[in-house]
Image (spheres, grey):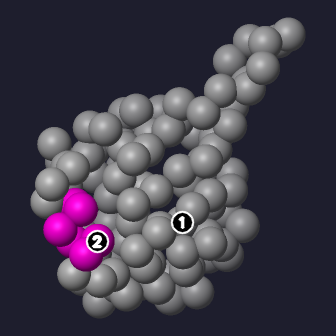
Amino acid sequence: MKPELLKVMATCWSLELIDVSGCTNFDDSAFNYLGKGEVMLRAGLPPTNPGFIMLHTLKIAHTKLGDSGLISLLKASPLLQHLELNRCEVSEASLKYLIKEAP
């Protein structure tokens, strides 16, 4: 799976589950796309960035996810209930942010 796929997924704001576990070529730059996806809701209106308003499960274990990617994903996923990020490259500070900010 190529990181460019995450650019396309970023516009699928109705996704409920994302599983890219084991995609070791995905790093923060790729994951930052997920938090920044713009979609056109109606012709003639500017694009909007709804984030992943329906996402409840995110499996990103064994990737090169780092601090900025994790924070981007958390900000874009207000309903997140299940997160798998073992063997990622996140720091203790990001984990503290996760504990503080996650619903």
> Where does label 2 land, which residue?
94
Q: Give the left or right position of residue 39, taking residue 74 as reference.
A: right
Query: In the image, which residues are magenta?
Result: 93-98
| Rendered residue at 21%/50% (across/down) | 101
Answer whether residue 7 is visible to the viewer in this image: yes
Residues 74 and 9: in front is 74
> Where does label 1 land, which residue?
31
Using the rendered view, name the quadrant where residue 12 is placed.
top right
Cβ atoms at labels 2 and 1 below 8 Å apart:
no
Within-10-Å neighbours for mark 1: few <14, some 14–19, many 20+: many
Residues 48 and 4: in front is 48
| Rendered residue at 62%/72% (across/down) | 29
Q: Closer to the observer: label 2 or label 1?
A: 2
For numbered disc 1, what is the local secondary structure? helix
Q: Earlier in the sequence, mark 2 or mark 1?
A: 1
Residues 20 and 91: in front is 91
| Rendered residue at 37%/87% (across/down) | 89
**Quadrant in which the N terminus is drawn:** bottom right
Look at label 1 and name its amino acid. Answer: Phe
**Quadrant in which the C terminus is drawn:** top left
Q: Position of residue 19 (x, y in %)?
A: 39, 64
